Image (cartoon, rainbow, N blue to C red):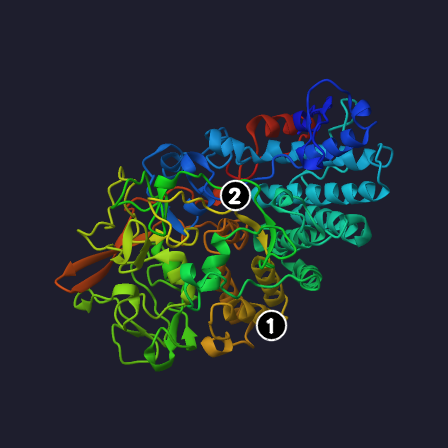
Amino acid sequence: MRNIILFLFFVSALHLSCTKVLDITPDGRTSIEEALSTNEGTGAFLNRCYANIPQLGYNWFYFGDLPTAVSDEAYSAKEYNGVMSHYYGGQSSAAYHDLTGVGDGIQQSANLGDQWNRNYQQIRLCTDFIDRIGTATVTNPSDRVKWEAEARILRAFFYLQLIQWYGQVPVLDKVYSANDDFSTLKRNNVYDVAKFIVADCDLAIATDDSHFGGEAWRITSGVSERQRVTKAVASFIKAKAMLFAASPLHGGQEHWEEAYQVSKKAYEEVAAHGYKLYDKVQNVVEYGKGNGAAYREYFNEPYNCTAADVDHETIWQNAKRFATFSSWFADGLCWVGGRGTNYMIGECPSQELVDAYEIVEFEDNDPAKKILSARPLLNLKKPYLDPDRHLLPNFHPDIAVNTTSARFTYDERMANVPVNYKNIDPYGPYWNRDPRLAESISTNDSQMKGDPFDDNTFIEAYIGGREELRLATNNPMNTKTGYYTWKWAKPHNGLMKNVIMWSWKSARLGELMLNYAEAAAESGHLAEAVAMADAIRARVGMPSLANSGADVNNQEDVIMRVRNERRVELAQENIRYFDLRRWQSPAGDLSTTCKYFTAMEITKTGNTYGYKRVPINNAPRGGWENKYLLLPLPVTESTNMEGLTSTVWQNPGW
């Protein structure tokens, strides 16, 4: 900790040619006092507080999405290479953990990895700014008030990052000097850190809106300002912090009622300022008119930060786009091999994730019509009869398996399943599912849209097909699971176009609503939990939980359904990694979710298919053990602080 506390940040002269605060950068010659003697210098100081915000998505090592790849949402086709081979092989250590390593140049530029140092560096900057802004030179009195509020929101954000990754961390409410006594420093429990986060956020929210130039709750001055924090960001941060504080991993279950109160207030704050789910598709040509069209469009179109923007769901958006290599994005598919010149496919959605999407009953058995009711595919309390290996699904009692003559049918026969182009006829495992499946994941017979293929081209995930399952460890071109990612790929953009993935939604109303739903369910406010989940489901035409087999008056059942709703709605958004961990007890592990994985092996005979679940990995995939619930502190840091305080600082197992 000492080397972070004494971190010497820019304290420098400033390049003053830019007019916007976020554009001003230091040039290395001026002291802090001199910098704060001008309005531009004070603004530049705040600019430094905005550094190191992680730019999530496919910006990790080798253009990967590491938190998704090491959760139960996906299995990486790059398992043979570098970071993935090291992590999957169970070789991470305190000296080098794959999620804390700085990776390659892309990962470094996206501020990913090295979480301990990056976040404490920013916390020191924010704290110093808050301490000094009262006497700094600021031309506009409203800027002084607004800038302090921004610094408090940013400090809260960086503390949130720390508790997500590390659990207990020290709360530093002042800038330490070399003369301070470090022997009394401690790692505060997560609840205390969360309370500090909530306090900073509440102070920022309490600031009068008049100081924000019309942008207290929402940025409307253009996309160049999309990374600037607002009161809505503060509301989002405090609710999420309390979710961690109350979670079993951190022993905070007695705080669920408080987490509920904070989350409820946060939701009401943002909803009162115009935030709502993105529920109406704008580009019907690209995305169609289906139940899930608006959901797919939301993730593939940017939030432009204007008053006229139709996106009222995004609370905060990445400033950095994904990689822009057009050859890696084809046919409306994300990183799919088999046809074209693609380099690799990256993270393949897991069979376990596919199993989380509910079976639905369509009006007249027609996927083009209304969904009448639904059921979970699996028994959520015990989804697999073999809890570790997942080869034996434990179907929900209302599901009729391998038949087409019941309300809720699931067809995973090993032979004689008719070909089902577009998955619109009542055959096979994919036609009657929650619409978010088809909009997030490509399956066998999914329609390929876009240049250079016409709309009569379909995914060939069967053995011998061009998108076939290949389990060889040195093949990055084909799926490891039987599936490919679609959630981030825009339809009708293929090899002949420059496909650019849109900026990641770092905070959105959909997640805040499910944070509220979880806290409400855990604290016994079941009606509110169900209402939030139902609103999320309604966006894609899914029926209410009550009409989907849930006992909405049973707390255990509501908790399970809310957790599954999080899994589906927030799939591949870097959230499941943390959910899996914070739901564990301190002595728990990830043996039932992240140890073994299955793939769907499909064979084709004439115009029929056979479906069979097969193991991807016969040996356990690394990263499931207890110690992987939290990241290790940097070795030098923990060693130094243990010497100074005579207490253990390193996380368990490392």
Please name the residue shown 52% across and 53% down the image: 579
Q: In this view, does 415 lie to the left or right of 2?
A: left
Q: Above or below — where is 433 with respect to 38? A: below
- The residue closer to the viewer here, 159 or 24, is 24
**Residue 123 seen from this side:** no
Snapshot quadrant of residue 447: bottom left
Res. 107 mark: none
Q: What amino acid does circle 1 point to?
A: Leu
Query: Residue tagged by mark 2?
Result: 56
Say above or below: 373 vs 567: below
Looking at the image, tell me whether mark 2 or mark 1 is earlier in sequence order: 2
Q: Position of residue 558 (x, y in %)?
A: 53, 70
Image x and y of residue 216, in percent: 74, 52
Say whether residue 17 is left or right of residue 506. Answer: right
Q: Which image quadrant for residue 288?
A: bottom left
The one nearer the camera, 538 or 130, is 538
613 or 190, nearer to the observer: 613
Whole-percent x, y for residue 464 in the image: 17, 51
Can residue 384 be seen here?
yes
Which residue does the image show at 32% across and 50% down from the upper left?
A: 451
Q: Position of residue 467 (x, y in %)?
A: 25, 50
Around disc 2, counting alpha carbons within 10 Å, would you say few (fewer than 14), some (14 to 19), or many (20 or more)? Answer: many
The vertical placement of 115 against 285, above or below, is above
Which quadrant is the N terminus positioned in?
Answer: top right
Tell me how far mark 2 sits from mark 1, CA to CA. Answer: 33 Å
Is 103 left or right of 148, judged from the image as shown? left
The residue depicted at 22 percent of the width and 49 percent of the height is 466
Label 1 CA crowd tier, 10 Å (few <14, some 14–19, many 20+): many
Which tag is nearer the camera, tag 2 or tag 1? 2
Q: Name the residue under label 1.
A: 526
